[in-house]
Amino acid sequence: MIKKYFILYLAITLVFLSGCLGEKVAVKNQEPNINEARIFYISNNSKNFEEQATIKNYKINDTQTSYVGESFINSKDILNMVETFDIFKPTQNFNILDPVNASFVQDDIFLVQGSYSINNKKYLVVNNYALKSYYQLLLDDKNNVAGLLKFSRSLNVTDPVYIIDKNISYEPKEIKFQKNVYRKETKIKDGMRYELIYTGCTADNLTMVYREYTPDDLARPAFFQNLTYNIKQKQIRFKNLLIEIILADNEKIVFKVLKD
């Protein structure tokens, strides 16, 4: 009976020791690689704000031509929602060779992904959709390409670590990036609009009509005005507008907006 219990005790002990050894091996396999590191968040200076803007059909000091009955001055106020954030663009075309095989041009946009530090060196991490999902580009403190990061493994579901892929080559060998600000404008509200319509001339006068519109583009009857100017005038003024008349007849008007 004692012998029977001793054999059972010995079997349980062996199973316990075997589990401990297996656990030690598993822990050993998870020891961090000194060449691996996480990508840490850094700000891309993202901003969102409302901004007033004006859409015009003219440019200051540009010579333009309009015909009788046309709106030769047209200006509309709008309210935009503006989004801005930092991006990076290469200063020349370049290729990343095997195994990535990706080509980029000067206008390609690279988004800021974070920062990466390894061996006491800190890099900026940027990415473009043309790179494979497990690759990221490294820039040094002068915005030169310093290497390519490759996904190494995940410590858990939300904690990936990366390693610099030393087998990657580039064309050309030296690639520089430049920081830019991406800007996106989305109209959220229309404002007031006004226009000047050229209606021709007589022997003595230039004639035109001023009209003002509500945000929903309906004419405001109280803001309608017939305007008359001496045909010999080289410049005419209406409100803040100063207009140089280059040529005017019953077919067209050639003009420059000098101030608005």
Image (cartoon, helix red, strand yellow):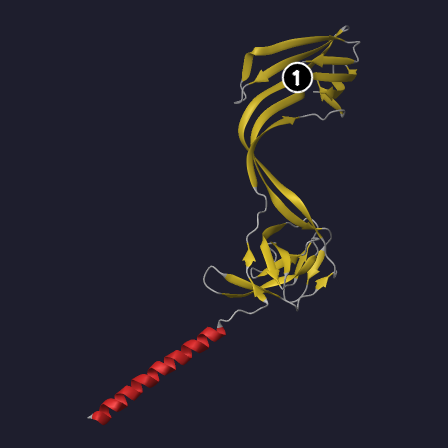
Q: Amino acid at mark 1?
A: Leu
Closer to the camera, 33 or 3? 3
Residue 18 % position (x, y): 38, 82
Residue under numbered circle 1: 196
32 above or below 243? below
Q: Secondary structure at mark 1?
A: strand
Q: Residue at x 23, y 89 (%)?
A: 5
Which image quadrant: the N terminus?
bottom left
Task: Write down the quadrant of residue 133 in the picture.
Answer: bottom right
Q: Position of residue 170 (x, y in %)?
A: 71, 62
Res 174 → quadrant? bottom right
- Neighbor class of circle 1 (other Cα within 10 Å; few <14, some 14-19, many 20+) is many
Task: Work out whether residue 95 or residue 83 is closer to the camera in this orientation and state it.
Answer: 83
Nearest the eye: 140 or 177:
140
Q: Residue furthest top?
A: 204
What residue is shown at x 60% (from left), y 60% (from top)? 117
Q: Position of residue 55 (x, y in %)?
A: 63, 27
Identify the residue shown where x is 75% and y is 20%.
258
- Quarter of the image for the C terminus: give it: top right
- Residue 137 image offset from top left, x and y in percent: 63, 58
Q: How many marks?
A: 1
- Going by the image, does 232 lie left or right of 140? right
Query: Dividing the picture into quarters, in which one does residue 197 lie?
Result: top right
